[in-house]
Image (cartoon, grey):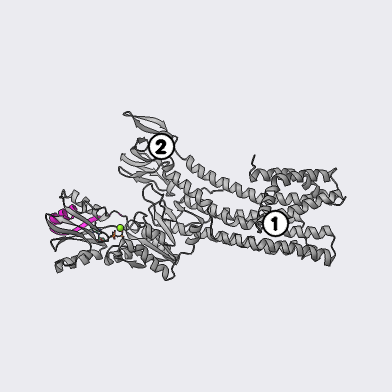
Amino acid sequence: MKLSNIQRFWISFVLAIPMLIQMLAMPFHWMMPGYNWIALITTTIIMAISALPYWKSAIAAFKKHSANMNTLVATGTAVAYFYSIFAMMTGRAVYFESAAFVTVFVLLGDAMEEKMHNNASSALGKLMGLQAKDAEVLRDGKFVKVPLDQVQVGDLIHVKPGEKVPVDGKILEGITSLDESMVTGESIPVMKKAGDTVIGSTINGNGTITFKATKVGTDTMLAQIVDLVKKAQTSHAPIQNLTDKISNIFVPVVMIVAIITFVVWYSFIGATFVQALLFAVSVIVIACPCALGLATPTALMVGTARSAKMGVLIKNGEVLQEVSDIDTVVFDKTGTITVGKPVVTDIVGDPTRVLTIAASLEESSEHPLAAAILDEAQAKEISPVKVDQFEAIEGKGVRANYNNQIAFVGSNRLLVDVNISQEMITRAKQLQKEAKTVVYVGLDKKIIGLVAIQDVPKTSSKEAITELKNRGLMTVMLTGDNERVAHAIADEVGIDKVIAEVMPNDKAQQIKKLQDKGRKVAFVGDGINDAPALSTADVGIAMGSGTDIAIDSGGIVLVQNDLRGVVRALDISKKTFNRIKLNLFWALIYNVVGIPIAAGLFAFVGFTLSPELAGLAMAFSSVSVVSSSLLLNNAKIAGEDTVQEPIK
Ligand SMILES: Nc1ncnc2c1ncn2[C@@H]1O[C@H](COP(=O)(O)OP(=O)(O)OP(=O)(O)O)[C@@H](O)[C@H]1O
Ligand SMILES: [Cu+]
Ligand SMILES: [Mg+2]
């Protein structure tokens, strides 16, 4: 049977109670009958079930010629324990309580960490518990209730007012509002209609919908979020390497200091062998750097869980640490700053002719601009005609044979060797200044018209960018679109710098350029075609799209398609990382101050620490570090509109 740290703590604690009573009774000169034997037996059990793992780890480290925190715990407890056995056999005073209490106190820190871990995962468990138990699924022409695990991709599901959406899917019929706060952190219900995606475990408002299941079981968004947060919580932050390094130097140094303490007290000051030994043991115990070991993981655990509740998924500790150094945020334009749903606003030239040619060519394109043109054609009841030799020219447009003539639709980069009227050029510039993307439609080496397409900024973009600028960050827009359009949109949302007319493949290169200038860059994109840019940046922030959050290239995934998530990600990461630094500082300071006291430097003013008091002080430092991490739950984060239930 393997005991948990919490169990080991309680067993040791209960067993140590007789020794506690004896310690408290000491000033009254009361001696527990048979105390030595009671202490021997209880301490032996405590050593066997609670201290042994520390000893084993210390021995394993010793064999590899290294030392760790357990080396200190093991040495301290072993010295006190074996000396006491020797003392008992030779009729001297015993110090079993030192060995016992130090073990209890070290375990207190470990047990607290375990408890915190359990709570964090049960909070995640609660998130999973939000799932519906069953679903009303269409089977053999009728909607019937089936258990959740029998729902399959493609099933048609009926959701009534107030019910939970069982799995992820796409609405086929009905209009409703959904409370998605449990997944996205957004407290305002979201309107949903046919064609929109729904997320499993969200709560239906007062409409009735029928939707088609697209993701079930472990593929659902909620399952993915839980998975991601779990991984993040057990991940490593680079600053931890520093902790390990400190421990590596620290432990041998402490052992030497302990030996010096013993020698000085015994040989030079003339203390008894036992007194000198106790000073040395106190030094070893108070130096135990377990608070140092708790500083990073506990803060990481709270920080990542907290951010997940706000719809910001930070993949690991390394990302969290990187984010706190960021000084530049680069945004993709389409779909990131803008809504990503471009609409045709103006047509220059013969509208029917221009749209017919444009739509015929765009039919084979997957570009968002193509979708806008096709929507417009459909609205005007213009049907595309078949073209041949279709060719997509990346970052420029499309070309094809239209009625045996070469036709193209695209940016001004395609305007080589073609005739264009001065009037068209002027109109194009004008439209671009209105933040509209101009697409030229050419036929047989002549521009026959323009299509102006607008993609408006999201309402939240300006606020988010202002917040980022308030925090002293430089904001940059990166786009394949025309310079004038890019500037018009940048001005609208307050972006500092524009890098326009960038070929899709060069986006990563542009980020590299900024990095070469010494900038620490975060790139925000939709994760669909900006994977290279996302992975080149120091931190890649991928905007969630629909129900898919398994975006590999981003270090951070925003569940909501909203730039305010970037601000939150930044704030939480900074706060968590600062907390880690504060924790480390306290853990270190505490050892620096504690060791001289334990070594008896203040004995001349009558101030000394017995090993068990040193153990108590050490436990106190662990407890304060854990509490400090928990306080992250209460830290204020910008834009947090709901009162969050803290994760303990
Ligand atoms: N299928 C297309 N139809 C019409 N024009 C196109 C097409 N593909 C590209 N273009 C032209 O090339 C330009 C650059 O395209 P690209 O895909 O690189 O960037 P974008 O989607 O406009 O902007 P962003 O980089 O912000 O996503 C577009 O602005 C447009 O003028
Ligand atoms: Cu410790
Ligand atoms: Mg694009």
Mark 1 Cβ inside 8 Å of ligand 2: yes
Amino acid type indicated by mark 2 = Glu
- Examine the structure image and report whether residue 75 is included in the region drawn in magenta: no
Label 1 belongs to which residue?
A: 72
Local packing at callout 2 (Cα closer than 10 Å; few below 14, some 14-19, many 20+) is some
Local packing at callout 1 (Cα closer than 10 Å; few below 14, some 14-19, many 20+) is many
Secondary structure under the numbered disc 1 in the rendered image: helix
Res. 600 in view: no
Secondary structure under the numbered disc 2 in the rendered image: loop
Residue at 68%, 54% in the rendered image:
58
Q: Position of residue 491 (x, y in %)?
A: 32, 66
Q: Position of residue 227 (x, y in %)?
A: 47, 46
Q: Relative to the observer, which residue lies in front, 28 or 438?
A: 438
**Is 471 left, or right, of 273 in this rendering?**
left
Q: Relative to the observer, which residue lies in front, 191 or 280?
A: 280
Magenta segment: 340-360
**Is 398 left, or right, of 67 in this rendering?**
left
Q: Position of residue 471 (x, y in %)?
A: 45, 65
